Structure formats: structure tokens, C-alpha cells
Amino acid sequence: MADLINKKFLAGLKYRTNQVKNRAEGKIFVPVERKLTPGDVLDWREEGTELIIVAGDGRKYRVERKSAAEDQDESGKGEE
């Protein structure tokens, strides 16, 4: 179900995770941010004019459906 989300709704959203680096004194966890991808989305649902997206890092985002729909109309074709 998460793969069915339009990538336009994920624009500007970040996925936060850690990279493990092994050092002589032990493991160090370095925080890393990257763009949110459809594979990072655990669940999403439409609620009124908003799209609620739950990411694998535990964050919940509320995105306006209208703005992404307008972008889709301007381009003349949708991304499916």
C-alpha cells in the first residue's frame, strides 16, 4: 500500500536514521537525514484535504492534498 503513494506528496519530507561507525573506543551512532522515499512509508491515509503519512522513523506528517493535485494538473500528466 505504501508503494502506491504519489512521490509528489513526499517532496520536502525527511527520513531520520543513524549510521554506525566503528571506532577504537567503540561504536558511534551518527545521525543522518535523507529524502523520504515511498519504501520508507509505513502507512498513509486521506483525511479531508490532508494526507497523513507515517514514516518508518516514527514521524507523522500532514501534507495538503490540494497542492500536489494542482502540481499534477499543471504538468498535464500524473505519476502512478
Image: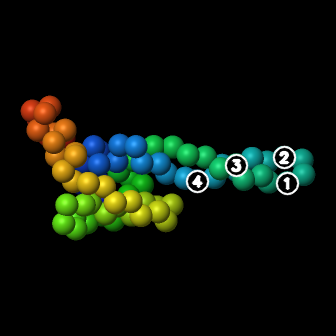
Residue pictured at 49% horizontal, 65% vertical: 58
Q: Amino acid at mark 3?
A: Val
Q: CA distance from mark 1 to mark 3?
A: 13 Å
Tell me, yes or no, whether the two marked residues, 1 and 2, touch with CB atoms within 8 Å: yes
Task: Name the residue at the top extreme.
Answer: 75
* Mark 1 vs 3: CB contact within 8 A: no
Residue at left offset 29%, top offset 48%? 9
**Which numbered circle lies on residue 17?**
4
Which is more foreground, mark 4 or mark 2? 4
Residue drawn 79% across the image and 54% down it: 27
Estimate the x, y position of residue 26 in percent, counting from the top left. 85, 54
**Residue beneath disc 3:** 30
Q: Tell which tag, 4 or 1, sits nearer the viewer.
A: 4
Residue, disc 2: 23
Badge 3: residue crowd in 10 Å (few <14, some 14–19, many ≥20): few
Q: Considering only order in the chain, which callout, 2 or 3, is on the residue closer to the N terminus?
A: 2
Q: Tell me where residue 18 appears, x and y as whole percent.
A: 63, 52
Q: CA distance from mark 1 to mark 2?
A: 5 Å
Q: Nearer the viewer, residue 63 or 45?
A: 63
